[in-house]
């Protein structure tokens, strides 16, 4: 999943301009293009599918309402959406009353209605443990790991989202990997 | 405190572990569809539409105020008409 706005800049800019004038069809195309990525980002930040749905809905509602004030500063549109998502997740974490989490495997069972096959259950437990370890890290480090591994973005693309230089992202990534290895070793996960 | 010496192989293994675990998930299609409806059903007006709606509102307000003024003044106007018509008739009677 790469930031594809760089490959189709004109059409994306046109879509944003049309959507900011109230064109629902244009906003719909932007929604279809990014809803999956934003959902994934929030899902791995919260570790909870219900919260991910709620916060994803809020991201797109906020984006729709603020689109007339959107300024093209040379960054991809996705960077703007990720920043909205990042701020909403930060608020969500601050609100301690909403931190009662549903385990990922349980959430998956609720979604499908049936218990998961054993292999999938093990995978889900591994994801859950990793998310718990990640949540001990700063929001910036969590964001970096998710954008890198879940979204598959390059350091340059992550830099645009995080408003940092490519070099700064590379350095933060290296430090995050070292810290993550220590934490995972302590947990006996690797 | 992290270990100071880490081999590239060790970090590559960790990256592989992360890549294998943190895989993209598919959101519930029902959620995607419902959110799409919620976002699209809500009518959004363009600046042009908002200007037109504002002009229509102003026109409607003007008509309403005008109608109210006419209604308020109607009894007075009818009284004036009656008075004027009675004054037109009175001199005729005086000469007869």
Image (spheres, rainbow, N blue to C red):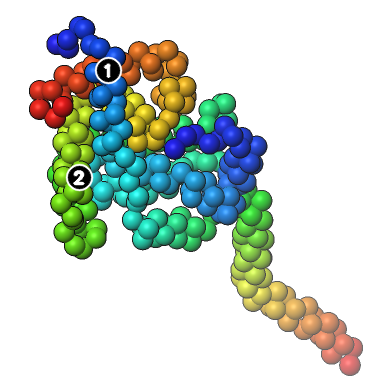
Relative placement, left or right, of B94 versus A170 is right
Residue designated by label 1: B9
For residue A5, above or below residue A54: above
Percent from the top left, x then y, of residue A160?
A: 47, 24
Q: Dot 2 lies on which element?
A: helix
Residue found farthest to the right: B95
Relative placement, left or right, of A6 versus A114 is right
Residue B45 appears in the picture as rendered: no
Nearer to us of marks 2 and 1 is 1
| Front position in the image: A22 or A189 | A189
Q: Dot 1 lies on which element?
A: helix
| Front position in the image: A158 or B34 | A158
Q: In which quarter of the image is the C terminus of chain A?
A: top left
For residue B1, above or below residue A20: above
Percent from the top left, x then y, of residue A72?
A: 57, 30
Label 1 marks a residue whose chain is B
Percent from the top left, x then y, of residue A99?
A: 17, 41
Label 2 marks a residue whose chain is A
Q: Which residue is drawn at 29% across and 42% down?
A: A43
Residue designated by label 2: A124
């Amino acid at each position: 999943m790469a930031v594809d706005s760089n490959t189709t800049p004109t059409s994306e800019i046109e879509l944003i301009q049309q959507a900011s004038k109230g064109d629902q069809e244009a906003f719909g195309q932007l929604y279809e293009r990014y809803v999956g990525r934003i959902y994934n980002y929030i899902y791995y930040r919260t570790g909870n599918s219900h919260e991910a749905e709620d916060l994803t809905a809020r991201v797109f509602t906020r984006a729709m309402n603020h689109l007339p004030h959107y300024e093209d500063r040379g960054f991809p549109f996705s960077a703007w959406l990720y920043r909205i998502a990042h701020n909403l997740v930060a608020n969500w974490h601050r609100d301690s009353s909403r931190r009662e989490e549903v385990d990922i495997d349980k959430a998956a069972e609720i979604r499908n209605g049936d218990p998961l096959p054993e292999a999938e259950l093990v995978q889900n437990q591994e994801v859950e443990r990793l998310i718990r370890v990640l949540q001990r890290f700063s929001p910036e480090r969590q964001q970096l790991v998710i954008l890198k591994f879940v979204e598959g973005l390059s350091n340059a693309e992550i830099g645009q989202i995080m408003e940092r230089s490519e070099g700064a992202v590379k350095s933060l990534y290296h430090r995050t990997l070292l810290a993550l290895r220590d934490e995972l070793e302590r947990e006996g996960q690797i | 405190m992290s270990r100071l010496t880490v081999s590239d192989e060790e970090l590559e293994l960790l990256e592989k572990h992360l890549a294998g675990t943190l895989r993209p998930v598919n959101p519930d299609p029902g959620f995607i569809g419902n959110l799409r409806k919620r976002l699209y059903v809500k009518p959004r007006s363009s600046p042009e539409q908002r200007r037109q709606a504002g002009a229509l509102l102003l026109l409607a307000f003007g008509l309403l105020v005008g109608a109210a003024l006419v209604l308020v003044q109607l009894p007075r106007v009818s009284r004036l008409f009656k008075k004027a018509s009675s004054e037109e008739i009175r001199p005729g009677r005086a000469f007869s």
